[in-house]
Image (cartoon, rainbow, N blue to C red):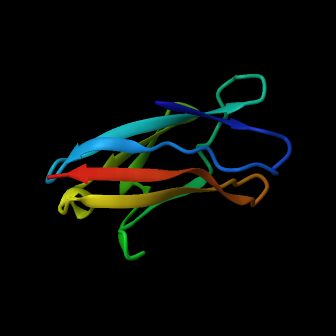
Amino acid sequence: MSTCTSPSQRNYESPTLNMKGFKVGFTYSDFVIFQNNDRTEKDINTDTFAFVITNAAGTIVETLTLGAGLTIEGLGKLIWLIGTDTTGTAGIYTYELIWTQSDTGAVSPALVGRIIVEA
């Protein structure tokens, strides 16, 4: 679980969450909770997201979107399900969770990191 706050200023580096211990052929789920500056849950129900996963060569191996690997629960909980498109082969993958806010049109990486898949 991670928490992503929504600051009033957009001059920051994306939070990093590295995921390790994944085994080849398994599916994994995790989530992030988006919060306002006052720590209340931010309503992300009208926002869009893309969770883009690339291999070491930079080739996209899996893209999760709402309804296809990404789910919003409640106001601000975004759940992802990483499948065998990513875990089918051992290696180190990188990902970027791209957040498009419906109220401002702002597009930004909300979370970045590595996914380590072991044999």
Depth check, front residue: 19 or 50: 19
The residue drawn where x is 37% and y is 76% is 57
Quadrant in which residue 37 is drawn: top right
On the image, the x and y values in percent for residue 97 come to 53, 54
- Decide if residue 65 is on the left or right side of residue 29: right
- Decide if residue 27 is on the left or right side of residue 57: left
Q: Residue furthest top?
A: 39
Q: Is residue 51 above or below residue 55?
A: above
The residue drawn where x is 76% and y is 48% is 12
Q: How many marks?
A: 0
On the image, the x and y values in percent for residue 20 come to 33, 42
- Decide if residue 4 is on the left or right side of residue 82: right
On the image, the x and y values in percent for residue 81 come to 32, 47
Q: Is residue 66 above or below residue 28?
A: below
Depth check, front residue: 112 or 35: 112
- Decide if residue 47 is on the left or right side of residue 51: right
On the image, the x and y values in percent for residue 3 come to 58, 31
The residue drawn where x is 75% and y is 59% is 106
